[in-house]
Amino acid sequence: MTATPTSPTGRPERLIVRTRTSVLAQLRDRIAGAVLGPGDAGFREARAGFNRLVIHRPSVIAVPENHFDVVEAVRFAAEEDLRITVQATGHGTGVAADGGLLINTSRLTAVAVDPVTRTARVAAGATWKAVLDAAVPYGLAPLMGSASIVGAIGYTLGGGFGWLGRRFGLASDSVLSFDLVIPDGTPIRVSDASFPHIFWALKGGGAGSLGVVTSMEIALADVSTVYAGNLFYPAAEAEEIIRRFRDWAPAQPEALTSAVTILNLPPTDDVPEPLRGGSFAVVRGCWSGDLATGRAIVDGWRNWRTPLVDMWDEMPFAATDAISMDPTEPMPVMVTTEWFDDLHDEAIDIIAGCARPAPGSAPLIMSAEIRHAGGAIARGAAHAANDRARSGRFLLELISMVPDPQVALAVESTQRVTRTELAPYVTGATYLNFTSGAERAGRAADAYSAEHRRRLLEIKATLDPYDRFCHGDIG
Ligand SMILES: Cc1cc2nc3c(=O)[nH]c(=O)nc-3n(C[C@H](O)[C@H](O)[C@H](O)COP(=O)(O)OP(=O)(O)OC[C@H]3O[C@@H](n4cnc5c(N)ncnc54)[C@H](O)[C@@H]3O)c2cc1C
């Protein structure tokens, strides 16, 4: 016998025990957007996100058309005693919702750029691509990450470490205000001047815990053309390349944000011919200063050793998805991460050993990327909610595709063993955006110092006493 799901206040989840159709009809009457129950056409699509490994199983999905729909949906959940989960693109799903209300923000895509103040107001479901499209005509750029299909607000709530990071900081540093619907359904605007403690908590303090952010206002950077790309070396040279990168990157100006990546590319048609099915050690990054200086910096690598393939070039910032070449089709993905202050030789050997496939066997790790942080990312740490999640020098991200449960087991074991071996060398901090599923919830506390976590929990308890937003990062 299965236990009856209980609601945030401990009562049985009412949508489960009451006639679903009448409750759904009530919400349909209240919002302009779609309301879907299990079995309705479109329900499966509306709950599915990019990462197909973590699938929400809500009792009801609301797909708001506007800000007012979000307010009504959250009020409805409060009246019906339901938990609430928010999903934009599903790139960063944490714990899967079981029952309750899922608010799918994908129709809230408006972006308005003010070229005079160099700011943008970005709605809940807008991707970075939508922000780019609106900002580029004015020579402006948002602090987006490696893939423009990621949701701008979900990315920012988790911090947001992108290719302009060392120069301008995390995306959360660029936020001027959030419009937030708090768990009782009240809409508020938070900024340095209004509810500053909630503003502080939302700026990198984690996603999905304090309410639904219906929009954010962000400062845009004055960046249009950059020098960016990849140098591909054989994966057999990975240890040597990573050691050189460790010593080289900290000496570079903050206009360079760079990474070294062991990349195992699939043998598929979408991968360019010289790289298809290959295993590489890649030096990649983005220089947003004077272009000739950027070229000279990368020449240092070319002169040291000629790469197999050289893709660094001048490019519009809007084209920088080409640096990471991240997958764009939904798929099951497992991601994990660690921070390092110093990259010891032993740690480098462990990373290279786990990521480089044994001869003749398929790789379990698609990408092992070590991003160089510091600069404005580290400078902003002391005051940021996620202080521990941004103060290290090198950030490792391990990404694997897991097409079936057997591969998932093998990947889970490889990631766990690698993290255990790396334990003596890491800081122990978590960068939330580079975790997913249960691991995101399990390690969230390590994004914050004890003092910042205490403040976040206090804010959470005041705003959300029934833990209605229980699937988020603070908890
Ligand atoms: C291909 C790829 C590339 C990436 N590159 C980078 C990178 O370069 N740098 C980096 O820092 N991260 C990167 N990420 C990680 C990404 O930032 C996180 O996965 C982020 O959580 C995605 O946000 P989303 O809104 O798109 O996803 P979702 O899964 O929809 O949301 C993620 C979290 O945010 C919450 N959330 C979303 N919208 C709202 C809202 N309006 N109000 C309240 N809570 C909300 C959700 O509840 C969930 O907890 C990448 C991820 C992928 C898959």
Image (cartoon, rainbow, N blue to C red):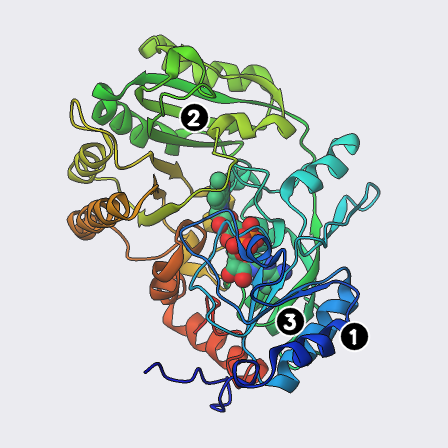
Residue labelled 3 has its Cβ within 8 Å of some atom of ligand 1:
no
Report the front residue among 4 and 396.
4
Residue 171 visible in this rendered orientation of the protein: yes
Looking at the image, do the residues carrying marks 3 and 2 touch, with CB atoms under 8 Å apart?
no
Residue under numbered circle 2: 284
Image check: 455 left or right of 224? left
Q: What residue is drawn where x is 27% and y is 23%?
A: 241
Residue under numbered circle 3: 196
Label 2's element?
strand
Distance of label 3 from label 2 (alpha carbons): 37 Å
Crowd rating for badge 2 (residues with CA inside 10 Å; few <14, some 14–19, many 20+): many
Q: What residue is drawn where x is 17% and y is 52%?
A: 420
Residue under numbered circle 1: 29
Report the front residue among 351 and 391.
351
Report the front residue among 213 and 177.
213
Image check: 405 left or right of 151? left
Looking at the image, do the residues carrying marks 2 and 1 touch, with CB atoms under 8 Å apart?
no
Label 3's element?
helix
Q: Nearer the viewer, mark 2 or mark 1?
A: 1
Crowd rating for badge 1 (residues with CA inside 10 Å; few <14, some 14–19, many 20+): few
Which mark sits nearer the N-terminus, 2 or 1? 1
Please tell me whether residue 131 is drawn above or below residue 235 in the rendered image: below
Image check: 440 left or right of 358? right
Q: Looking at numbered disc 2 in the image, what kind of residue is underneath it?
A: Arg
Q: Residue 283 in the image: x percent, y percent? A: 38, 24
